[in-house]
Amino acid sequence: MASGLFTRHLRPHLLEALTESRAVALLGARQVGKSTLVADLATSDHPARFISLDDEATANAARADPTGFIAEISGPVVIDEIQRAPGLLLAIKQRLDSDQSRGQFLLTGSANVLTLPTVSDALPGRVEYLNLWPLSQGELHDHHETFIDELFGGHFPQVSGAPVGRSALASMLTTGGYPELQGRSARGRSRFFVSYVASIIGRDLDDIANVRNVENVERLLFMIAARSGGLASFHGMATDLGIDTNTVRAHTKILEDLFLIRRLRPWHANLGSRQIKSPKLYIVDSGLLTYLIGANERRITDDGDITGPLLESFTAMELLRQADWAQEPVQLFHYRDQQQREVDVILERHSGEIVGIEVKASATPAARDFAGLRHLRDKLGTRFKAGVVLHTGADTLPFGDRLAAVPISGLWS
């Protein structure tokens, strides 16, 4: 069944969680489809009352008397945008402690409720958390991606005759995955993002943090966008913004809690201590990223300096989405050592098995593009399952033991 016009691949996992947990929290940025998905569940597979705290009168009532608000609820309930009345969490805890039945509460939040001060005492062990991101390309194309699972099985997507070059990807990258933007014009997308950023910084920020200078958070968001996919230099960003390093670190965490950015930690297990320890920072959606850096389809087609980082950010965040429904849990990292050998994205299972992904905006992959992947393969032996260079060419091409070049569309086709 679809959430709006799109079937969300997380839907069966959300239903499974509701059968196993007393409460489930679905977290994600505004406008990614959380309310649509949970409202659909509440009228079909998980019948429940639906309460939205985006309604100011409802939110005021919940804040004024959290215990009484929850006491009046019987049976399963969806509470949308829980961060707008965080006092409800303690009342929910009391209900969950006295009633062990499953699927009582389905909560959504446009900010990471784990960061709210009340949560450290209220919810650990009682609530299962799931994240919903903007639509993946598979969700947009009505196809369930198995890219990650196939690579861990040693199988590469066999793509042939894919559209060649950056221009073939420009529309996809500028549109991104927010449901509201599908089918909109470039001007319409720009209007959406102007309002979107202003409303999140102006409204949701207050729900999770006390920030004296909100403008600095917005300036930092634009700066991270300009450096998306690069190694994070908190000191460098602080210098450029004219604020202190600790403030930049704190504001970066806020942008993560609002699900606007995501960091990839460096991967360095069992490869010595020479790896560079800085994380990478990514804007979570390519449409949002192109807005923040002021790019359009023509610039993506013509300017490789723009397209390379944009394509890497897009790929990393597509993999982040797919990791949520992979057969086995998988974590995302990046790798770079002091010899400048690097791999854009490392996927690691709990078993220690590794898959490496490199992203190139070129349509003609070459052996040199596999230097970091070959290094990891030779160091890790059988732990290394597959290495892929994603490119803008037409065909899947073999490049040696457990290595292949795959067109970008192999991510979802």
Image: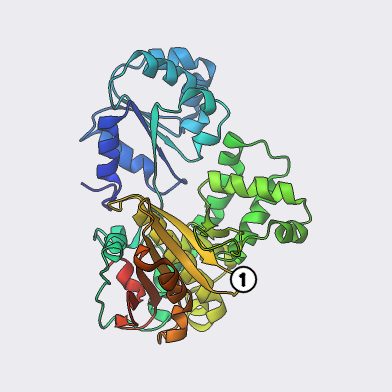
Q: Is residue 400 left or right of residue 173?
A: left
Kindly identify which residue carries mark 1: 338
| Residue shown at the point (44%, 62%) measured from the top left | 346
Quarter of image, res 80:
top left
| Residue shown at the point (40%, 62%) measured from the top left | 184
| Residue shown at the point (46%, 45%) measured from the top left | 30
The reply to whether residue 135 is visible in this rendering is no
Amino acid bearing label 1: Gln
User: Could you say which is closer to the camera, residue 6 or residue 305?
Assistant: 305
User: Could you say which is closer to the camera, residue 238 or residue 396?
Assistant: 396
The reply to whether residue 316 is visible in this rendering is yes
| Residue shown at the point (33%, 25%) measured from the top left | 22
Residue 167, percent from left and from top: 42, 80
Quarter of image, res 219:
bottom right
Residue 197, percent from left and from top: 56, 51
Q: Characterize the local packing of mark 1: few (<14), some (14-19) or many (20 or more) Cα atoms within 10 angstroms.
A: few
